[in-house]
Amino acid sequence: MIERYSRKELKLIWEDHNKYTIWLQIELAAAEAMEKLKIIPRGIAKKVKSKSKINVKRILNIESKVKHDVIAFLTSITEKVGKDARYLHKGMTSSDVLDTCFNLQLKQSGKILLKDIDILLKTIKKQSIKHKFTLCMGRSHGIHAEPITFGLKMLTFYQEFLRNKKRLENSIKEISTCAISGAVGTFANVDPRVEKYVAKKLDLSIEPVSTQVIPRDRHAQFFSTLAIIASSIERFSVEIRHLQRTEVLEVEEFFGRKQKGSSAMPHKKNPILSENLTGLARLIRSSVIPALENVALWHERDISHSAVERNIGPDATIALDFALCRLNNLIENLNIYPKKMIKNLNMTNGLFFSQRVLLKLTEAGFTREDAYKIVQKNAMKSWNDNTPFFENIVMDKKITNKIPVNKLKKLFNFSYHTKKINIIFNRSLKK
């Protein structure tokens, strides 16, 4: 991932030095287990640990000649350790190291992403509670529907990211497996107890059946989860972009004192953060199809998945980390305009009370079909003539013959639409 969209903590997980450090941890843990099982001489792991040193430049130099990354790594360790290094990797295959390392890197990345979501949840919750009863227009198909509150709008995202947190926790658990099973996964040349020891040492679970690789359905789930989280980020971003449009302007991204919106038009204040998040969501979701296609490897293994994972592993996790942090900053500093929300509510002259009138007419004895026709006729008159909806219905004798004007007036009450807000908040925020 390019520097522009990378944060240091997660980026370090995918750098070569961390990868080779994990490889060495795996090899040392396997050697420790083999020592305990008296497969190799005592003290090998300790000697290797004391003498070995990760030299990324040297490893890459060797790899350029031997065309094999694990062999290059082991050769570089041997150069530092000497003949005792021959006991490393005994009975193991490259995928034991590569797959266990990749899963550990995904787990490390996932834990950072969980922290990001926790921070975001606190920010969304704060805004939702603050604006619990801030009236705004609810829209369906982009058209004014009935009133909601801005806090309730925020609460939908709070619940969505709670679900995302749970999905990610499950996916981290799913991906946190270790395989030290040797060529084609039969343990013919390595004791299964070695795998158990390494898994425990690295805080992973053993892979029950690993063939020569860890099954890629686990990875497909992990990357699918990242894509779902990215889609939630985009949903939030699209909401902000729509609400910031000049004609709406109910919210607005924070705009710095020295910030510029356009190279040509000095008046512009554009929703660049939420637009950027929409783009990053597309990028993160693009990892899903390759991850799904990686599931179908030939027989016990091939390496068609390798190039894919070397790209989507860092790119998807780093991009999502950046996106979650950017979204949190956006929501934390969002400019919210309750007065404009009220102005927009009143834009259609009370048309959003149409359902209340419809229901009242059915209670008064009208069929639903007849009641709908009567209300719709008056609503369209109000829409076309830009006249108050209430004035139109009180002039309709079909309505006033059944319902007194004073009762009709009581139908036009904003509090009717917010009376159950507390119930929704209580069940959403309960522990």
Image (cartoon, grey):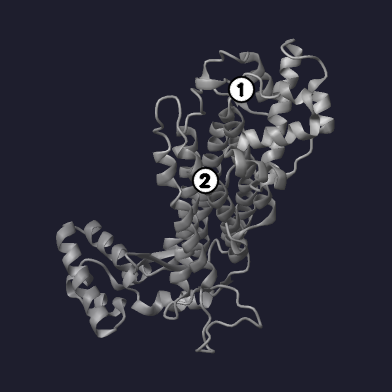
Q: Considering depth in this image, is 256 or 216 the residue closer to the camera?
A: 216
Which residue is located at x 31 percent, y 80 percent?
Answer: 388
On residue 164, the disc is: 2
Q: Can you name the residue that lies furthest to the top here?
A: 38
| Up-down relation of residue 286 to residue 49 (above or below) | below
Residue 385, horizontal then vertical, whole percent: 25, 85
Q: Mark 1 is on which residue type? A: Met
Residue 408, horizontal then vertical, whole percent: 31, 69
On residue 92, the disc is: 1
- Determine crowd level at label 1: few under 14, some 14-19, many 20+ residues with C-alpha closer than 10 A: many
Q: In this view, does 22 lie to the left or right of 364?
A: right
Quarter of the image where one finds residue 402: bottom left
Q: Mark 2 is on which residue type? A: Asn
| Up-down relation of residue 37 to residue 301 (above or below) | above
Q: Is residue 309 left or right of residue 360?
A: right
Which residue is located at x 42 percent, y 62 percent?
Answer: 416
Q: In front of the other: label 1 or label 2?
A: 1
Which residue is located at x 66 percent, y 41 percent?
Answer: 62
* SS type, badge 2: helix
Q: State the quadrant of the N terminus.
A: bottom right
